[in-house]
Amino acid sequence: MGWNLVRVWTLLVYVFMFAPVAVVLLLSFNASQFGSFPMTGFSFRWFVELAENEAILRAFRTSIVLGLLTALISTTLGVLASLALVRYRVPGANMISTILIAPILVPEVVLAVGLLLFLNFLGIPKSFPLLLAGHVIFTLPFVVLVVQARLVGIRRDVEEAALSLGASPVQTFFEITLPLLMPAVLAGGLFAFTISFDDITGTLFWKPGGVETVPTQIFAMLRNSISPEINALGTVMIVMTVGLPLLGAAIARRMAAGRGA
Amino acid sequence: MSAVTLTDIVKRFGSFTAVHRMSLEIPEGSFVTLLGPSGCGKTTTLRMVAGLLDPTEGDISIKGRRVNDLPIHKRNLGLVFQNYALFPHKTVADNIAFGLKYRGVPRDEAAKRVADALELVQLPHVAERYPKQLSGGQQQRIALARAIVIEPDVLLLDEPLSALDANLREDMRVELKRIQHRIGVTTLFVTHDQSEALAMSDRIVVMSAGRVEQTGPPEEVYNTPASEFVARFLGASNIIDARAGGGSGDGIALDADGFGRVVVPLARAPQLSASGPARLVIRAEKLSVRAAGTTAGDGAIGVPARIEAVDYQGQAARYFLRLGDLQLQAINMIDEHPFNEGDEVSVHLRPRDCTALPGAPA
């Protein structure tokens, strides 16, 4: 009896969490003009319209370029920062570590306004590179956390063994440390990409005029009317942000299995 | 020419001195062991030879060449760690070939040398496996193969047997010594295990608190400890307060608590002056326990004692003895039956088994 209640309750929680997502997914295949129930038939027409909408395609390209660049820069900086903090004795390492993690703790709006005011103070106009810089700032903590945790687990003596066998420190990094770090680097990169791809708060503040990412584009479209295209776009977003990490995890598992781990 | 020479090496970490002014020569092809408890500076010394730490003062030479400023990857050393430190993402063959790659050895020759190395460590069939698929003992053999395949000038072993379980450790000990002998590589071995040190070394360097306590062949270090620390660290020893009372032919006469006059051969009392406080060291296995009233032969001194406790070890027994104010231990082979707790016995001590050290009684 008690357990049945718990089961029902759990089910309700999940329904509450995922029903809105399910509605978006369902309605994106609705043939009707209006993005609401009842459904009048099954159709891909909104996906087709989506693919023909110049503004949305442009937003998609912007989001993907932004996400990839954010992931690339964040993982590079994150790996370097983690190496410095874990492998070398840096004065004030704790302080630096806290500051690197801080963007997670500060509300995003505060961070967004702060960066904007700072740029204003410096007299720098908004631009794509600055939007990118913003995204790097708040994806970096995730990369640093994941990579640091992994790096702590890589024994120093494995690197020392490589050095003793004649590999230079740089060769040791690329032959030993980086391959062992790869799962964390990939995970960090995926985090960075999906967070950047999803972000709206910071992006709204930082984007220069005329540049739209997918979330800001949806936001702009919602202001006029609830078009069924938005549902279709929502479905594409969900597939990307859920599917990519799953794909990443599958690849990581396969890589691990390959070496008999 | 010595393969490795340390000249007045000092290593400080901040205000802590890990190694005090140490000098050491390791002859070509020999097996030298740094032995001591943890924190005695033995691993620090090995890491300085390896180039993983820089000495604060002093010079390190390998094959006559000063290497202080030479980074580790240019020193041509074989390094074996306690935890194997194999590359988990590479196969056994790639692990062993790693060092050859940076020495520009052609591919087919490298493959041959890898196969030879696997043969040498008696694991010819594991080349394509990953380290995690091997047992601890096998992993350590691969680590050894990886270190020697590059034909290093010096092989550095940092407690390589400590992670293995007891039986395997003894097998690996024999195996390691066999391989070292076969290829004749100069070896510096670090351990806290006295039986490893005694079984494997040509020379033992006993260290304590960053200082060298004694250097010598295993027999010498074991039989004639140069300090109370060495006597206590290697095996079980009895240390008895005594007073030196002048020379007596080829020996020094001591008046030892409990035993009276003991004449220790000069060779076993090199640091002792003719008079003053001294300490008499006798190994537990050299002190023999006999039935009460047995006459002491062979120049031995017999005194009565009582057995306070017995630690039965199968073929031998360790007796804890009470002799007036003295507490002694003796490890004797068991002849039919061990003595029992509370037995009155006779303890026999042969002066030529004793070592005399100078010392102020505490």
Image (cartoon, rainbow, N blue to C red):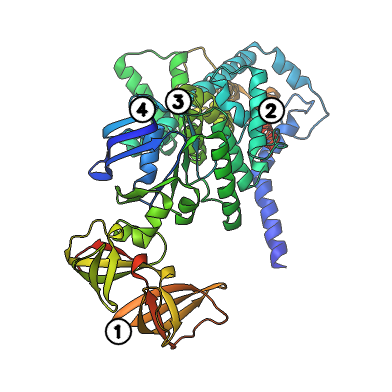
Q: Earlier in the sequence, mark 2 or mark 4?
A: 4
Q: Residues at marks 1 and 2, common chain?
A: no
Q: Is residue B301 left or right of residue B316?
A: left
Residues marked 2 and 4, same chain: yes
Query: Does residue B310 lie above or below B205 as drawn?
Result: below
Of the 4 image quadrants, the one containing the N terminus of chain A is bottom right
Numbered badge on residue B324? 1
Chain holding disc 2:
A
Q: Secondary structure at mark 1?
A: loop
Q: Residue A227 location in percent, x, y?
A: 67, 24
Residue type at numbered disc 4: Gly
Q: Which residue is mark 4?
A: A114
Dot in front, 2 or 4: 4
Residue most toward the front? Answer: B249
Q: Are the residues tagged 2 and 3 within 8 Å (C-beta)?
A: no
What is the number of callouts on the image? 4
Tag 3 residue: B73
Other residues around mark 3 within 10 Å, as few (<14) / some (14–19) / many (≥20): many
From mark 1 to mark 2, how far is it between C-alphas? 97 Å
The Cα atoms of the two marked residues, 2 and 3, are separated by 59 Å
**Which of the pair B233/B344 is nearer the observer?**
B344
Label 2 element class: helix
Q: Amino acid at mark 3?
A: His
Q: Which residue is at the far right?
A: A41
Q: Kindly indicate the quadrant of the structure image that contains residue B148.
A: top right
Q: Nearer the viewer, mark 2 or mark 3?
A: 3
Which dot marks residue A231? 2
Residue type highlighted by circle 2: Asn
Name the subunit of mark 3: B
Question: Does the image show residue B5?
Answer: yes
Tell me the number on the disc at residue A63. Answer: none
